[in-house]
Amino acid sequence: MPNFNETISNVKGKWKETMIRFTENKKTKYNNKKNKAIIIGAIAGVLITGLSSLYYYEANAVTLYHVYVDGKEIGIVDNTKLVDDWKNEQLTKAQSEYGLDKLDINNQITFTEEKKFKGKFNNEQAISSLQDVFNIKATGVALIVNGKEVGFVKDQATADSILKKIKEAYTPNQGKAGVMASSTEQKSANTGTKLETVNIKEEVSFKDVDINPSNIISEEDMLSLLKKGTLEEKVYTVQDGDTISEIAYMHNLSTDQLYQLNPELKGEYINIGDELNVTTLTPQVTVETVETVIDTETIDYQIEKQKDSSMFVNESKVIQEGKEGEKEVTYKVKKENGIVVSKEILTEKVTKEPVTKIVKRGTKVAPSRGTGSYLWPTAGGIITSNYGARWGTTHDGIDISGVSDRTIKAADSGTVIQAGWNGGYGKSVIISHGNGVKTLYAHMSSISVSVGDKVGKGQKVGVMGTTGNSTGVHLHFEVLVNGSSRNPLNYIGR
């Protein structure tokens, strides 16, 4: 069966041949009816043959659509609707996946129509080829810091919200107790803060962009990126022999920064296998705040020392207790990302004057040797255990208790040769009085003298307690002559 083009060509040829014959017959004036009939019959035959061929072509021709993506043909389909339906399906899926509304196609899809005799198409192949080159774009907003694109968010409202929140994170009265504490670096009784200015030091701008929707990050992630400089935290696993300070040094951190990154850390205690966050933070923006801070602060009292010749050296007595004063201080505090970078005192006003503490200190020099006459070493009291045999052994001194004033006094003048912890005696003092005589005071709660001190007869050497091997508050008192214990009652009197 000849194709359409061949049929047309045959018709044209026969028509031309008939017309030539018609012209020749006219020239020869051959115009009889017979010849006319022949001519008309020839023309009719040609027309019938052509119309028959055209009908056959129309009956077997199909309309095809060549599909082009960005000017390149990728396939042939018999219906453009299936391409449009597939395209809309991809947009719907992407909107659901990325949670974005403003999505469009990043490709230019066009069609050319062709009517072809027994034309061939392949819808599946065309869609498959389309899928290989198909791209979806999102309309987003680029956040630019000092000319550099930091990241992309879905819209301008999100970008504005991020800048607002990044500022609020470093401003007072936002529940930031830690920031307030670092702001003043004081433990004050009353603090009032007024925010004067809050600015971002860097140049921040925005730009509408068409990008792949996978590049758009959430508001929360963008906040983290601006504060930390990264969305990926670096983790270090503790090895045998590691210390907090060494780990911090290895990762260019201070120990304070390492503790801030790992609030679960307590002191220097870490275990092998522990995972620590060692992310070096490099914030993308710097929030600068200027605050007026009013603090009520304490004023330390002065100490006035007065000499008293009736008291021994190293003895002292408080005549007047000191009291702290108060002042109201107004500061101008400048911070960057919550860290104080400058602090200037604007005004100071004393609201309560401090009271001076007055202390009398002795100037009387105690003799290094005793008088040979010994005082009772406590303010009264009773003997609860005597010198001699006790519980199958020898008790080398006497135990005194039952006092209202627990002050322990030197039995005689001398030099302190031991002051501190002394085995079963607990906290104790030994005084050498010369001539081989020493006195020992044991089980003290506190000691008032030091080794080498010269103490006078009756001077305070400590406070009665229950340190060492003791069953209750008392003074264990011994007298030693040339290293051997003696019954103290033979030396001291009430």
Image: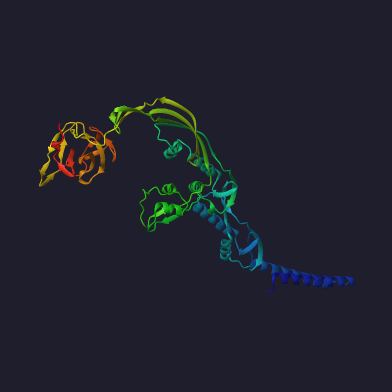
Q: Residue furthest front?
A: 435
| Residue 267 drawn at (x, y percent) | 36, 48
Kindly indicate the quadrant of the structure image that contains residue 24.
bottom right
| Residue 209 drawn at (x, y percent) | 59, 49
Question: Looking at this view, is 101 or 204 the one in front?
Answer: 204
- From this viewpoint, is residue 331 visible? yes
| Residue 389 drawn at (x, y percent) | 10, 44
Kindly indicate the quadrant of the structure image that contains residue 39.
bottom right
Using residue 210 as the reference point, say whether residue 314 is left or right of it. Answer: left
User: Which residue lies at the image location 44% right of the left edge and 28% below the top edge?
Assistant: 328
User: Which residue lies at the image location 56% right of the left edge and 44% below the top edge?
Assistant: 156
| Residue 242 drawn at (x, y percent) | 39, 56
Q: Residue furthest bottom?
A: 1
User: Which residue lies at the image location 20% right of the left edge and 43% below the top edge?
Assistant: 425
Using residue 299 as the reference point, say whether residue 111 is left or right of it. Answer: right
* Quarter in which the N terminus is drawn: bottom right
Q: Residue furthest right?
A: 28
Give above or below for 23 relative to 371: below
Using residue 328 as the reference point, say whether residue 145 is left or right of it. Answer: right
